[in-house]
Amino acid sequence: MTRYAGLEDVTVWSNGTNGHRILGMNQAAFSWFKNVETDGTRNSFAGRHMELYAQTYRCEIRDSYVHGSSNYNQGGNAYGIDYQGSECLIENNIVRELNKPIVAENSGGGNVIAYNYVDEAIIGSLTNSWQEAAISTHASFSHSDLIEGNHTPN
């Protein structure tokens, strides 16, 4: 397991392979992404921007800018921050123009999602009357997470 490792102060984008992650953290504890921009508009990317896998504990995503995709249809094509770990902190990020901007996928609980700015959630295959959730759970049994102080539409 990786401990106390981080990625800071960079801009990253995909190599154009769809269905993958731009950044992922797996089997990590006390690790972080800080002040990272992920740009999904380059190289025809469709997938997840940042993912904290289920085997993460007390990791952080903070002060980052996550945006854009080349495919806004359902099926994991335009996910922003996807978290599954336990006791993680997702704080003070800007997440825009994605169909699942911040999403819990079977989170292990005890996570804090706070003071993020989330806007312009997009879904590509439905009519304009559909409003996608800015911060949501996606799968069974996401539990005991604190979601507070975020700026989201509706």
Image (spheres, rainbow, N blue to C red):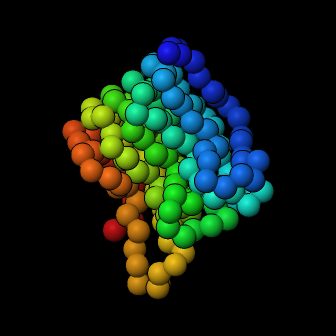
Can residue 97 be seen at all in this image of the molecule?
yes
Residue at image location 33% in from the left, 40% down from the top: 107
User: Which quarter of the rendered picture does the C terminus lie within?
Assistant: bottom left
Residue at image location 52% in from the left, 51% down from the top: 80
Q: Nearer the viewer, residue 132 or 24?
A: 24
**Percent of width and height locating residue 118:** 46, 56
Residue at image location 52% in from the left, 78% down from the top: 125
- On screen, residue 87 versus residue 32, left or right, reads left
Residue at image location 35% in from the left, 54% down from the top: 138
Residue 89, quarter of the rendered image? top left
Vertical placement of residue 22 versus 87, above or below = below
Q: Nearer the viewer, residue 40 or 91?
A: 40
**Percent of width and height locating residue 129:** 41, 84
Can residue 146 be seen at all in this image of the molecule?
no
**Percent of width and height locating residue 78:** 56, 59
Vertical placement of residue 84 versus 70, above or below = above
Q: Residue furthest left?
A: 144
Tally the marks: 0
